[in-house]
Amino acid sequence: MNNYNIEYSRIKALFALLLVAVLYTACTKQDDFKKFVEGGEISYTGKLDSVKMFSGDSRVVLKGLFLADPKVVKCKITWNNGQDSVVLPVVKKKAIDTLVYSISNVAEGLQNFTIYTYDKAGNKSVPVYANARSYGDRYKASLSNRGVFSAVKGTDGNATIQWLGMDKLTGVFTTELQYTNSSNKLVTVRTPIDSTKTILKSYKSGSTFKYRTLFLPDTNCVDTFKVAYSADLAVDEDMTSLLSNTGPFTRATYDGSRWGTLAGWTTTAGAKNINNNQYGGYEYRGGTGVLSFESGWGINTPVTNGLIYQTITLPAGRYTFRLSGIDQNSGGSRYIAVAAGNTLPNVTNIPTAAIAYANISDGELNFSLTQQTTVSIGFGVSIANTGQYIKVGSVKLLKWAK
């Protein structure tokens, strides 16, 4: 046999061996595959589609869609590393149906969920993963009511609540307040967290209000968290309407340029130190009228025992006489005072004879009356003619709620 025939025979033998090996391997793989699909091919049910999860109060809410697979008979949801689970029967009413389910008693914090659907034979879908946060006692313990800066009933019959600010990162979004109006009806109002005040229309004098603050910890939360209502709170009353000409101030007399006397106030001779003792107590300053004491700068007469006051009758209670827009320097005697009767004491006697007094620089005078009393309230000033001055933009009288 020549060399060509020998080589050809070897190639045929080698090819035959390779063919046997390929056939053996194919049969082996087919047998191995059959081990995994014994009893038939793997069957997957249709998974829950379009899954969304929402946070809540010790719970989360699951929403999803069952699509066209009619074989689905139940849905299983697991969380807490598989230690907690719930199984829901599925009865579809239409080809595409909606699942909405609240999962309760979920531990506080971010939780991961796995969702399977099953058919009657126990075949399950591929897993669907989702997560949501449950808010519980730790979050609730961090919440508090918004602070009240002031609560005052005005002369228009409405009460105004001025609020303190809050950290919006807590989820705070509104404050809910209840009060009684002048028709004895209980009224509930809500004020967004961005608003700094609440107007209580036709507020009933002598009544109280209470409030609570509401929170949504995230934009996907289905539950609103509410702190407990505050204690009943009273409202201060604005009694400024009992006074005349409280600012910006108007004049009774005027020199046509700058100086004058105040309308509605008693001004003693000692306070009239301008233009041969004709004017004092009023100044047209910066385009508006202010209550004024001034000496020096060409005004050669000092203010000596200068009294400017009004006489009114007040019921028993606690009061604040408050000044705004104060501009002054220092020196001399500068009092705000209230005294029983139809006049203020002389400046030197104010500390001993007044019901109460304070320095003008304090900005307010607090006093109490045990019974209805006619009082004079206002200013007592003595300053030298060395460039001393006092300017007041407006005054207000408040009666405390308690």
Image (cartoon, helix red, strand yellow):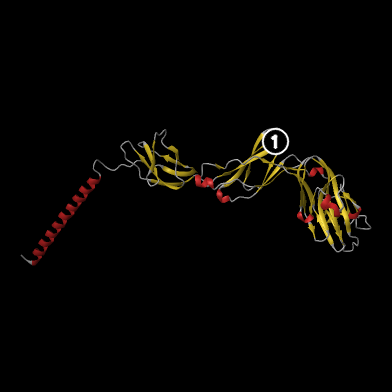
Relative to the observer, which residue lies in front, 86 or 363? 363
* Quarter placement of the C terminus: top right
Q: Which residue is mark 1?
A: 181
Q: Residue furthest right?
A: 276
- Which residue is pictured at 80% across the width and 43% down the height? 241
> Left or right of 167: which side holds 152?
right
Q: Residue furthest left?
A: 1
Look at 37% across and 44% down and name the residue there: 83
Classify 93 as above or below 384. above
Q: Quadrant of the N terminus?
A: bottom left
Q: Is residue 60 left or right of residue 3?
A: right
| Residue 336 shown left or right of residue 105 in the figure | right
Residue 57 versus residue 381 in the image, above or below: above
- Badge 1, how many Cα within 10 Å: few under 14, some, many 20+? some
Residue 277 at x, y = what percent?
93, 56
The one nearer the camera, 10 or 20, is 20
Q: Nearer the viewer, residue 281 or 193?
A: 281
Q: Amino acid at mark 1?
A: Asn
Q: Is residue 372 left or right of residue 193?
A: right
Task: Find residue 379 and report its horizontal and vertical position in percent.
Answer: 83, 52
Quarter of the view holding residue 43:
top left
> Percent position (x, y) of residue 375?
83, 44
Residue 171, horizontal then vertical, whole percent: 56, 48
Q: In this rendering, does residue 286 appear at all?
A: no
